[in-house]
Image (spheres, grey):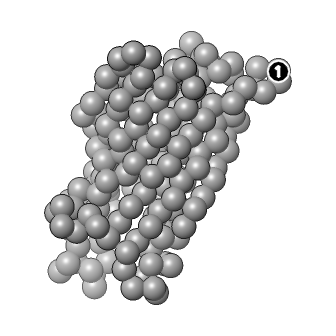
């Protein structure tokens, strides 16, 4: 399932970019996501004008009773790996579930985002992505919709935080 999200910021591109590059951005993320217990930054490296970042998300959701024998909260955790280029003002990202490696073949989520300058100091972030579950057709349709909804919530929360940080720069 493909998706696209656009956020507009009343901030110049360089201010927004400084907020994205901030090693403190992660500290505000869990507070903006009600279904996330914590977000931990495991990698934050800026080298040759490229930021490599890994954030680990631990969920705080109630696993439905019927799924409790099969699904644990640890199974719902994930890593978001992103590479942001200052030169192109764009990022590639991939989400990897914290599952046993042999189970990871059932899920794939990745995409890009770009910062685009507009008039009057407005900058847009265009997120494009794709989520794919490799399960039965019925579970695939429902599961992909739920996952895309959660991915959008995460990018929306990040956008709110970036707005705050970009106006402080």
Counting from the top left corner in percent of width and height, residue 99 is at 21, 61
Counting from the top left corner in percent of width and height, residue 87 is at 54, 20
Counting from the top left corner in percent of width and height, residue 144 is at 48, 70
Q: Quarter of the image containing the C terminus?
A: top right
Q: Quadrant of residue 167?
A: top right
Q: Is residue 62 shown left or right of residue 91?
A: left
Circle 1 crowding by C-alpha within 10 Å: few under 14, some 14–19, many from 20: few
- Rendered view: 44 above or below 155: above
Q: Is residue 116 shown left or right of residue 64?
A: right
Counting from the top left corner in percent of width and height, residue 51 is at 40, 25
Read off the residue under disc 1.
Answer: 120
Q: Quarter of the image containing the N terminus?
A: bottom right
Number of numbered discs visible in the structure rendering: 1
Closer-to-camera residue (56/63): 56
Closer-to-camera residue (152/27): 152
Q: Quadrant of residue 136?
A: bottom left
Residue drawn at the location 18% of the way across and 61% of the way down: 101
Residue drawn at the location 49% of the way across and 26% of the way down: 85
- Rendered view: 141 above or below 125: below
Residue drawn at the location 23% of the way across and 73% of the way down: 71
Residue drawn at the location 63% of the way across and 53% of the way down: 4
Camera sees residue 166: no
- Rendered view: 48 above or below 106: above
């Amino acid at each position: 399932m493909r998706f696209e999200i656009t956020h507009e910021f009343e901030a110049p591109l360089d201010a927004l970019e400084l907020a994205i590059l901030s090693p403190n951005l992660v500290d505000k993320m869990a507070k903006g996501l009600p279904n996330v217990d914590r977000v931990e930054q495991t990698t934050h490296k800026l080298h040759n004008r490229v930021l490599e970042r890994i954030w680990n998300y631990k969920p705080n959701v109630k696993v439905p009773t019927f799924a409790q024998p099969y699904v644990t909260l640890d199974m719902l955790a994930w890593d978001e790996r992103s590479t942001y280029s200052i030169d192109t003002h764009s990022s590639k990202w991939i989400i990897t579930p914290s599952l046993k490696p042999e189970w990871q073949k059932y899920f794939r989520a990745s995409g890009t985002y770009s910062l685009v300058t507009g008039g009057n100091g407005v900058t847009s972030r265009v997120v494009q992505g794709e989520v794919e579950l490799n399960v039965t057709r019925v579970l695939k349709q429902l599961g992909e919709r739920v996952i895309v909804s959660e991915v959008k919530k995460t990018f929306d929360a990040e956008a709110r935080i970036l707005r705050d940080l970009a106006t402080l720069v």
